[in-house]
Amino acid sequence: MSEESEIQAEVEALRERFSDTKALYREVCALLFFRYGITPTASKLYQHVRKGSMSAPAEALAKFWEELRGKARVEIDHPDLPDALKQAAGQAVSVLWTQATDLAREELAALRVEARTEAQSAQAQLQETLQRSSSLEEQLQTAQSKCAELESNLQNLAAELEQERRAHAGSAARGEALSRQTDELKLEQSKSRQHFSAELDKGRAAIDEATSRAAQAERRALQEIDRERTARAQADKQLEQLRGKLTEVERDHHAKVLEANAAQTRLAADLESARASLAESARVTQLQGVELLQALQAVTQHKAEADTLRALVAQFQPPPRPARKKKPIGDH
């Protein structure tokens, strides 16, 4: 802890003991001057206390110096001593007290330095002890983890040993089962050999019989092949005759196709001519229809004009004269 921190801690303790601002500043002055050897000032007092206005630490500081001077002044009151001797003796005692105070301050400073050195050494030892303790804890944790790992390995080995025992027991059981199966297989093999010998004899007899049947079948096949060859020769001959007939038929068909194509060409030409004639007739008929329509329109127009002329003639025709009355014959 630094000196400033110590002073501030002491000030906080004094703050709890003294509620009066002036008394608190006075005690802080004494603390700084007598315990720490620091000459108090108004700004330093206010920096540590921070209470009241700036005039409060100044007043407390002035009063502190006044009290200190009063205490430092020693008065020797003796009726037989002259005043000059009294003053000289008082000054000497004051000087002695000041020197004693300075010496006490120096010793206090030395003690503080020694105490700080011892505190720093103790802190270093404490730090080293803490580091050793941390290292020991790490080693302990490492040992515990190794112990746990060894226990886990031991459990795994025990489990593997149990599995090996079970596997060995299973292997022994499987070996016995395999021995029984081997005996059974040997017995079955013996039976199979006997059965195979019997089947082999049957197979040989069947092969001989099949060989005989194959020879007979081969003879029949050769006969069938001869018959097929004869039939094929006859069929080839008939096929050749049919090919000749087919050639003649194709030739006749080709001639008929040519005639049919010529007839179709003629019919197509006639059809095209008929279509042209029909188109011409349709065109002429259309023209005649147009002319007839125009003639009808002209007749209608002439008829309308004639009606118009009749109406005009009727309008401009003079009215008929009245007929004269004939005199009766008897009037003469």
Image (cartoon, rainbow, N blue to C red):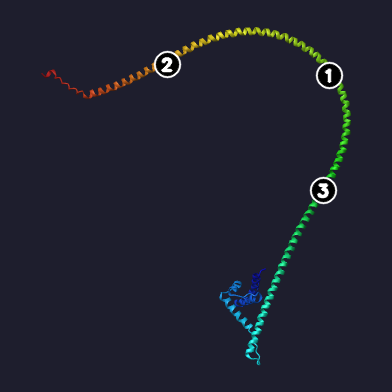
Q: Is residue 210 above or below residue 231?
A: below
Type of amino acid under label 3: Leu
Q: Residue at x 43, y 14 (%)?
A: 276
Give the labeled residue for mark 1. 207
* Along the viewing direction, whichever of 55 and 252 lies nearer the viewer: 55
Q: Residue at x 74, y 9 (%)?
A: 227
Q: Is residue 70 above or below residue 37?
A: below
Q: Earlier in the sequence, mark 2 or mark 1?
A: 1
What secondary structure is marked by label 1?
Answer: helix
* Badge 3 vs badge 2, beta-carbon distance below 8 Å: no
Disc 3 residue crowd, few under 14, some 14–19, many 20+, Cα 10 Å: few
Position of 7 compared to 327: left or right?
right
Q: Residue at x 86, y 25 (%)?
A: 196
Give the labeled residue for mark 2. 279
Q: Earlier in the sequence, mark 3 or mark 2?
A: 3
Give the labeled residue for mark 3. 157
